[in-house]
């Protein structure tokens, strides 16, 4: 049976990675978290105390020994063998990453890696520019959204569960800043592809969202 290419884009907290992972598990496909790749560059920048000039960040991205390993519903991310899966989720990394993602050379390196990883199909990839730039040939393109209040609440709950002390209003501001930076940047901005299917998850459960995507895959595979 044909193995599909599924692209899922949308803003922070819309549910992309949760829904993408579950979809990949159900279909026995690979899952690629492209946000984690940009986060890894931001993490390394902070780690090395690199002067955040475009040239320094570009060099760092070009030499980054980055690996993503998706197994049993979980992605492990390493840089030079060091596990950074959790370390890339800190508020500090979240604040820096939209700037890193605006550097042309960083995007070039990531684009090539992502296209290579997608291979011939059987993949769910999520991010901001997957349907528009990375995999414009994708069989299914989803654009996930949710209200900013709901997205901030989701992120807040996650961080509080991990032991962070952070105000909900702080997260609303961070997400609004990231939305603006990602939507207004010149290179590969956050944008729905013209042929993307929009799903608003503000009041839609994870399970219902995954079902919608699986139904779309079935339709595609059976030609219905
Ligand atoms: O998980 P969350 O939605 O908070 O963000 P993410 O998917 O981990 O992405 C972090 C950041 O990486 C985004 O805010 C973008 O600045 C950047 N990014 C991008 O530019 N292009 C992508 N394909 C994925 C992420
Ligand atoms: O990848 P993205 O930033 O778009 O979002 P996520 O990390 O998949 O989801 C953020 C949080 O929202 C997670 O804790 C999900 O469990 C939760 N979520 C939810 O409550 N309802 C949904 N329909 C989707 C996600």
Image: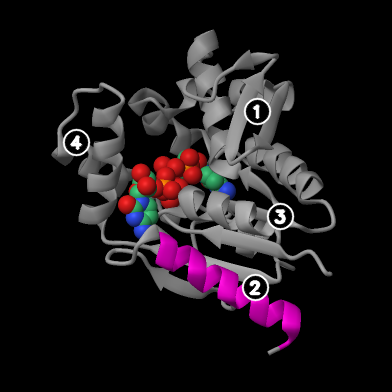
Magenta stretch, main secondary structure class: helix
How far apart, in angstroms, are the residues tagged by discs 3 and 4? 34 Å
Judge the density around disc 2: few (<14), some (14-19), many (≥20) Cα neighbours within 10 Å. Answer: many
Q: Which residue is mark 4?
A: 170
The disc label shown at residue 217, or none: 2
The residue mark sitting in front, 1 or 3, is 3
How far apart, in angstroms, are the residues tagged by discs 1 and 4? 30 Å
Where residue 119 sits in the image (x, y, percent)? 83, 51
**In the image, is residue 166 part of the stretch drawn in magenta?**
no
Q: Earlier in the sequence, mark 1 or mark 3?
A: 1
Q: Quadrant of the N terminus?
A: bottom right
Where residue 131 sits in the image (x, y, percent)? 62, 64
Q: Are marks 2 and 4 in contact (CB under 8 Å)?
A: no
Rendered image quadrant of residue 167: top left
The residue mark sitting in front, 1 or 4, is 4
Please report the residue visible at 66 percent of the width from the left and 37 percent of the height from the top: 70
The magenta segment: 207-223
Q: Which residue is mark 3?
A: 123
The residue mark sitting in front, 2 or 1, is 2
């Amino acid at each position: 049976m044909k193995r599909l290419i599924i692209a899922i884009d949308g803003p922070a907290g819309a549910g992309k990675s949760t829904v993408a992972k579950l979809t990949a598990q159900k279909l026995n496909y690979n899952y690629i978290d492209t946000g984690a790749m940009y986060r890894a560059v931001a993490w390394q920048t902070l780690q090395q105390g690199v002067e955040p000039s475009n040239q320094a960040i570009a060099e760092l991205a070009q030499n980054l020994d980055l690996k993503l390993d998706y197994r049993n519903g979980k992605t492990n991310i390493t840089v030079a063998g060091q596990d950074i899966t959790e370390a890339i989720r800190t508020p500090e990394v979240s604040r820096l990453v939209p700037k890193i993602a605006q550097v042309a050379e960083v995007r070039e390196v990531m684009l090539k890696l992502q296209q290579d990883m997608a291979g011939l199909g059987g993949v769910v990839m999520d991010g901001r520019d997957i349907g528009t730039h990375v995999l414009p040939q994708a069989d299914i393109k989803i654009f996930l959204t949710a209200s900013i209040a709901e997205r901030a609440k989701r992120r807040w709950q996650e961080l509080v569960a991990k032991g962070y002390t952070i105000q909900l209003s702080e997260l609303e501001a961070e997400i609004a800043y990231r939305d603006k930076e990602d939507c207004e940047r010149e290179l590969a901005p956050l944008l729905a592809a013209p042929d993307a299917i929009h799903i608003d998850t503000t009041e839609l459960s994870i399970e219902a969202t995954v079902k919608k995507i699986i139904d779309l895959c079935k339709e595609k595979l059976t030609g219905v």
